[in-house]
Amino acid sequence: MQHFIRINDVSTPDLRRTLEMAADLRRQREAGTPHVPVLEGKTLAMLLEKPSLRTRVSFEVAVRELGGSLISLRPDEVGLGQREPVADAARVLGGMVHGLIARVFEHEKLEQLAEHSGVPVINALSDRSHPCQALADAMTIIDEFGADVAGRTVVFIGDGNNVAHSLAAICARLGMRFILVSPEGFELPPAVFEDIHRHEPSAQLDLMPEPRRAVTEADVVYTDTWVSMGQEEEAAHRNAAFEGFQVNEALLQAAPAHAIVMHCMPAHRNSEITDAVIDGPRSRVIPQAHNRLHAQKGLLGVLYPGG
Ligand code: CP
Ligand code: NVA
């Protein structure tokens, strides 16, 4: 694996290796066994153009615990694509650090960083996708149902956004069915499913209009904010459009008893998900967030084999 920008670009064996390494590293951490310092002598740079809690902390801790160093770049200071072209910044950074972790508005910036830096580039969320989240999501589903998750069904209720995009792609890779339940006009663009199908012809990807009907088939009920970072001006319109798409206890009564609830967080309590559900017995959101650390360690282990 050279970069980690889109799930579709990662081979299934690399994805499986990442998830297995993540679980191994989690076991080591829980046992208090130190990791092999695969990042010793390596410095990564992280640039986050949008707010973050989970991504920032999980990468800072992951790099440190694998023996490397991480520099946090201030987006206003760097002015990626404004103070200078992305390609120039990438060429400069590539001669100084061993990898770039970037959270950006325009997904294309990640592709430019990868093209011009000559070092691994990790997508820490873009307007289009959030593959690091998808790794932690897959890990959480495997924790619940075992390594063979093929045939399981993930029902995503809400906005066809960056998180839904990467989740659909990883579900396809692992043989899970992905059902997206969005109000009209908020589905993933058709090109997203087409692209996943090109990479994974047997992918089971469906759109359903009605949450109650969809959750009857769910092993996992997943939701995310209705208003992603950068869409704040659309909040009123979006909150109105998503009425009826809340994950609440009444909806979950229609789901199988074993179905779990996931959310990438930050959660907007009592908008897309109620307090009772996110704090309830089906919720896996906290272990899911913790898995960001372990999943990204697995990713770094695969991107930097042998240190
Ligand atoms: N889920 C996630 O990426 O959280 P942050 O935005 O806090 O990093
Ligand atoms: N869809 C959300 C995910 C946050 C982790 C956003 O982009 O704001």
Image (spheres, rainbow, N blue to C red):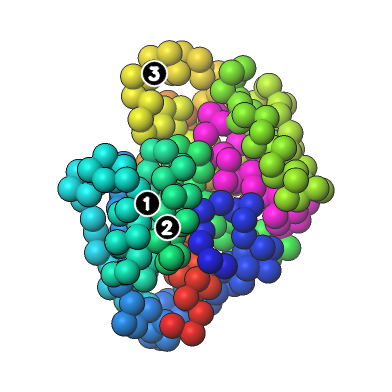
Identify which amino acid the numbered label 2 is placed on. His
| Relative to 112, residue 223 above or below | above
Q: Amino acid at mark 1?
A: Ala
> Disc 1 to disc 2, how far (Cα)?
6 Å
Asked which secondary structure carries label 2, the reply is helix
Residue at 66% x, 33% y is: 191
Q: Measure how far apart labels 3 and 2 are at the Cα level.
A: 34 Å
The residue that label 3 is drawn on is 234
Q: Which residue is mark 1?
A: 87
Q: Are marks 1 and 2 in contact (CB under 8 Å)?
A: yes
Label 3 packing within 10 angstroms: few (<14), some (14-19), many (20+) = few
Camera-side residue of 223 and 77: 77
Q: Earlier in the sequence, mark 3 or mark 1?
A: 1
For the residues labelled 3 and 1, the Cα–Cα distance comes to 32 Å
Which residue shows up at 32% across the image and 69% down it?
A: 95
What percent of the width, then of the height, locates residue 135? 54, 57
How crowded pointer 2 is (Cα within 10 Å; few <14, some 14-19, many 20+) is rated as some
Rendered image: mark on residue 116: 2
Q: Is mark 3 within 8 Å of ligand 2?
A: no
Relative to 210, does residue 255 appear above or below in the rendering?
Answer: below
| Displayed quadrant of residue 39 | bottom left
Residue extent of the magenta highlight: 149-176
Residue occupying image coordinates x 29% and y 61%: 92
